[in-house]
Image (cartoon, rainbow, N blue to C red):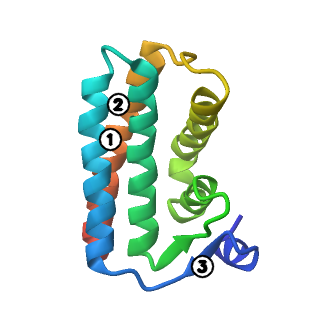
Amino acid sequence: MAIDDLLRSGRIRREAVSAAEIRQALRLADRDLRVARKLMAEEPDWGFAVAYNAVLQAARAFMFARGYRPASAEGHKNPFAFLGTALGKEHTDLVSYFDRMRNKRNQAMYAMAGRIAETEARNLLTKATEFVRTIHRLVKEAS
């Protein structure tokens, strides 16, 4: 799906976002990574959820830096649709992975707590840490 398709369908919208809001989203991503690391040993499902939130905040920062904002409906799904288009084919597998983790997080939070294994949570944290680092770099390059 192209960015124009996401715009036409109302999943994202063009909007000038302040540098302060971009920085805030990146700060939240960094904070969530720190908190996820602390939670991992005792509560891997919560560590997983917080690591996922770091990815979501970084994805939002990336969108903001490019002049877009996700629609409020499907607010977790739309940033990943945007990433899939904006980051290009070399990141398709990673974006797909994060989207699967979005679904898993939703199930763990609302349907069945305790479903996330520590190994899976730590794997997400590793990928989230790398992703947030990449987004910091991409946002810096764009400014």
Horizontal side, residue 45 vs residue 30: left or right: right
Which circle's residue, 3 or 2, is located before the other in the chain?
3
Disc 2 target residue: 126
Query: Quarter of the image containing the C terminus?
Result: bottom left
Q: CA distance from mark 3 to mark 1?
A: 27 Å
The percent position of residue 17, horizontal first and vertical second, equals: 39, 80
Q: Amino acid at mark 1?
A: Glu
Q: Nearer the viewer, mark 3 or mark 2?
A: 3
The structure residue drawn at horizontal position 44% and vertical position 29%, both measured from the top left corner, is: 48
Position of 11 with respect to 142 (left or right) is right
Q: SS of the residue at dot 2? A: helix
Q: Residue at x 63, y 32 (%)?
A: 110
Res 130 label: 1
Q: Position of residue 117 (x, y in %)?
A: 49, 13
Q: x, y (%) of residue 133?
A: 28, 49
Looking at the image, is mark 3 or mark 1 nearer the viewer?
A: 3
- The answer to whether 31 appears left or right of 54 in the picture is left
Helix, strand or loop status at disc 3:
strand
Q: Residue furthest bottom?
A: 16
Label 2 close to label 1 by CB (< 8 Å) = yes
User: To which residue does mark 3 refer?
Assistant: 13
Quarter location, residue 16: bottom left
User: Which amino acid, by three-letter code, is at mark 2?
Assistant: Thr
